[in-house]
Image (cartoon, grey):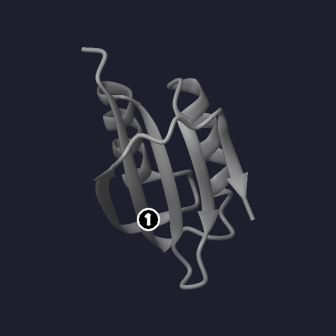
């Protein structure tokens, strides 16, 4: 299917200081997804990602593991409106 979807993802756990954003961008680019990732004050990581359903689904599954040193406790997802991002970036 060629259905484009948009998901916001909040990743909770030990996810800052473990290169989570860097790995998330690489994974998103590998899957052909667009959006952004940023750290939040609460220690969580916030991601907006969009692309084909199957690829976004794979990305969400990856988020539940994260990079080698991450310890993900919870991943909260919510569907939103497609915003037609250009590429995938790390935001400060």
Q: Quadrant of the N terminus?
A: top left
Most extreme residue toward the top is 1
Q: Residue at x 36, y 46 (%)?
A: 81
Q: Quadrant of the C terminus?
A: bottom right
Q: Nearer the viewer, residue 35 or 76?
A: 35
Q: Nearer the viewer, residue 76 or 22?
A: 76
Q: Nearer the viewer, residue 76 or 72?
A: 76
Residue 30 picture location, percent across and down: 57, 25
Q: Residue 87 vs residue 58: left or right?
A: right
Residue 60 picture location, percent across and down: 36, 45
Identify residue for label 1: 11
- Looking at the image, residue 75 lies above or below residue 67: below
- Looking at the image, residue 54 lies above or below residue 65: above
Locate residue 34: give its quadrant. top right
Q: Residue at x 64, y 36 (%)?
A: 26
Residue 2 picture location, percent across and down: 31, 16
């Amino acid at each position: 299917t060629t259905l484009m979807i948009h998901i916001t993802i909040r990743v909770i756990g030990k996810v800052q200081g473990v290169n989570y954003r860097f790995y998330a961008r690489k994974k998103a680019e590998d899957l052909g997804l667009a959006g952004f990732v940023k750290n939040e004050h609460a220690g969580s990581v916030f991601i907006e990602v969009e692309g084909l359903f199957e690829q976004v689904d794979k990305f969400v599954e990856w988020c539940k593991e994260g990079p080698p040193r991450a310890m993900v406790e919870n991943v909260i997802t919510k569907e939103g409106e497609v915003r037609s991002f250009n590429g995938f970036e790390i935001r400060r």
